[in-house]
Image (tube, coloured by chain):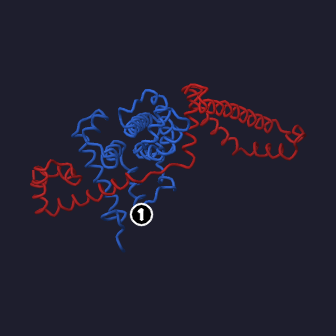
């Protein structure tokens, strides 16, 4: 074992300021006289300093707080199964919104309220419109229940 | 994770809106920690939701004898570690590029991004060890206890991770203290 190999296991702890003072003094006297170990300690100190600075940097996707609150509300209303519902419904709605048939069907419905059956001719489009309507109804229903429960909890008329 | 005395008192009294305020004031810290441990946004979002559902359930029994911020931090680490264990049994996702744009005033976005990206390039074991040690300030003993391994093993992982990160920063031209070399 070379002289440096004896100190290698301690260099990381030295760089992070984690060694006992007596051990740190011994390592310190070695790196004073060893450019290779001194360089390795300097490299590790860069990293430790950069990582500690990261502890002050926090970020989250826009709207995550509302998604979290919706999950908590669903849990409060429906237990573990309910906690997953808003997310799943939102995912399904996003998926449907990307479907051309759904977009065409929605456009036709919007353009010709009262003449829906005339606007949607293909069976696939009818199915897509039905799926969209069902999803919207379920989402709306759950949102109404959750919203109602939140209001009742806020008023203190429902148990948290 | 700092939680104000006013909010703590409101939570103790179960005041309306107190839990919403807890989520709004802490979710960025929870999400970022979950993201750094899991290494991808989808798992970090799932972990964040799970953390607050657990917090909601546990808050009724929380008497304030422990620090609420520390308690939330521990739940986040536990949920994120469980998520990574689940993920290890599923296909590994393509690593995401960076934290979302709305970061809180980073001093040097470019170099911070390089370091965040380098972190995600580490193996799961090395990343978790160095995140808990150098970003979250845990001791090697605490990490070893949490991960069910030895303190020596954690020291090796942290050492290895710092070396790899130093290599990556050097290859990207970043030098002390996270400043880019002039050409």
Q: Chain of mark 1?
A: B
Residue A67, position as x, y percentages in the image: 57, 40
In which quadrant of the rendered image does the C terminus of chain A lie? top right
Quarter of the rendering containing residue A105:
top right
Identity of the residue drawn at 36% across and 68% down: B180
The vertical placement of B54 against B33, above or below, is above
- What colour is chain A? red
| Front residue (pair A110, B160) | A110
| Front residue (pair A52, B70) | B70
Residue linked to disc 1: B108
Quarter of the rendering containing residue B92:
top left
Q: In the shown orientation, is residue B32 left or right of residue B65?
A: right
Q: Which chain is blue?
A: B
Residue A137, position as x, y percentages in the image: 73, 33
Identity of the residue drawn at 40% across and 29% down: B63
Q: In the shown orientation, is residue B2 left or right of residue A109?
A: left
Residue A124, position as x, y percentages in the image: 78, 37
| Front residue (pair B37, B56) | B56
Quarter of the rendering containing residue A117:
top right
Q: In the shown orientation, is residue B92 left or right of residue A109?
A: left
Q: Residues within 10 Å of mark 1 (few under 14, many from 20)?
A: few
Identity of the residue drawn at 46% across and 44% down: B26
Local SS, label 1:
loop
| Front residue (pair B120, B55) | B55
């Amino acid at each position: 074992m070379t002289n440096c190999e004896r100190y290698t296991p301690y260099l990381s702890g030295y760089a992070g300021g984690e060694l006992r003072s007596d051990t740190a003094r011994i390592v310190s006297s070695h790196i004073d006289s060893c450019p290779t170990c001194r360089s390795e300690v300097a490299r590790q100190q860069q990293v430790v300093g950069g990582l500690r600075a990261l502890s002050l940097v926090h970020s989250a996707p826009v709207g995550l707080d509302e998604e979290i609150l919706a999950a908590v509300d669903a849990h409060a209303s429906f237990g573990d199964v309910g906690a997953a519902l808003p997310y799943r419904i939102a995912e399904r709605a996003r998926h449907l919104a990307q479907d051309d048939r759904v977009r065409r069907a929605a456009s036709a419905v919007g353009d010709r309220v009262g003449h829906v059956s005339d606007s949607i001719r293909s069976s696939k489009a009818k199915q897509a419109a039905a799926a969209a309507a069902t999803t919207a109804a379920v989402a709306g229903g759950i949102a109404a229940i959750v919203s109602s429960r939140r209001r009742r909890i806020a008023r203190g008329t429902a148990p948290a | 994770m700092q939680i104000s005395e006013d909010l703590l008192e409101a939570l103790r009294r179960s005041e309306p809106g107190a839990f919403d305020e807890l989520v709004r004031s802490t979710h960025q810290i929870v999400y970022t920690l979950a993201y750094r441990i899991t290494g991808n946004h989808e798992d970090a979002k799932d972990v964040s939701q799970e953390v607050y559902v657990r917090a909601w359930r546990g808050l009724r029994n929380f008497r304030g004898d422990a620090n609420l911020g520390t308690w939330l931090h521990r739940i986040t680490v536990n949920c994120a570690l469980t998520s990574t264990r689940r993920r290890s049994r599923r296909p590994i996702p393509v690593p995401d590029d960076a934290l979302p744009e709305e970061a809180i005033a980073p001093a040097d976005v470019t170099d911070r991004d390089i370091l965040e990206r380098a972190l995600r390039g580490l193996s799961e074991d090395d990343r978790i060890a160095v995140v808990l040690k150098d970003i979250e300030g845990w001791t090697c003993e605490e990490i070893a206890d949490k991960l069910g391994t030895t303190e020596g093993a954690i020291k090796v992982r942290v050492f290895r991770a710092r070396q790899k990160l130093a290599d990556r920063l050097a290859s990207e031209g970043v030098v002390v203290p996270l400043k880019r070399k002039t050409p």
